[in-house]
Amino acid sequence: MKYLCLVYANEQELHGSPDSPHDSECFAYANAVQESGRMLAAEALQSVQTATTVRMRGGKLAITDGPFAETKEQLAGFYLVEARDLNEAIQLAGHIPAARVGCVEVRPVRELDIHAHA
């Protein structure tokens, strides 16, 4: 089953805390998950300052600079992994280096059969 591990952290703490992960540690973690055959995708996101929020209301496109919500922690990146079950996904998420300074939300992916609707 696929799980999306969303990494949230305060951007200042993510890069400025003594517990902050270094890029080399993040690459090592990603490589280990890749070599285990469980990595489907992983990306780090640019600063929340670069976010654009898009809404469609009444047929009109509304664009706002900035993130969807003003929060203490911002979405910093994600890992899309294949795991046997939620427990295995949680174990993978717990070893994401950024979990030391932020948190990781683990969510099962809802499989959509797009071919059935074509």
Image: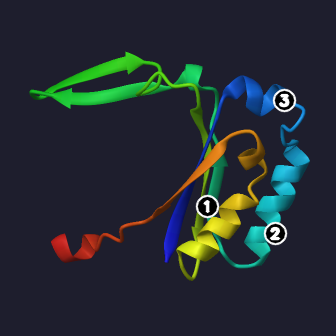
The residue positioned 62% from the left and 38% from the top of the image is 45
Residue to which mark 2 is pinned: 32
> Label 3 amino acid?
Ser
Residue to which mark 3 is pinned: 17
Report whether residue 15 is seen: yes
For residue 8, what is the image quadrant?
top right
In the rendered image, the residue lying farthest to the top is: 65
For residue 54, what is the image quadrant?
top left
Circle 1: element type: strand
Mark closer to the chain start, 3 or 1: 3
Measure the alpha-carbon separation of dots 2 and 1: 13 Å
Residue to which mark 1 is pinned: 41
- Foreground tag (3 vs 1): 3
The residue positioned 49% from the left and 78% from the top of the image is 1
Circle 2: element type: helix
**Quadrant holding the C terminus:** bottom left
Mark closer to the chain start, 2 or 3: 3
Query: Are the residues flagged by discs 2 and 3 in contact, CB closer than 8 Å?
Result: no
Of the pair 1 and 27, the residue shown nearer to us: 1
Measure the alpha-carbon separation of dots 2 and 3: 24 Å
| Lateral position of residue 1 relative to residue 80, left or right | left
Instruction: Tell me if mark 2 has few (under 14), some (14-19) or many (20+) residues whose alpha carbon lies within 10 angstroms of its own.
Output: few
Instruction: Tell me if mark 3 has few (under 14), some (14-19) or many (20+) residues whose alpha carbon lies within 10 angstroms of its own.
Output: few
Mark closer to the chain start, 2 or 1: 2
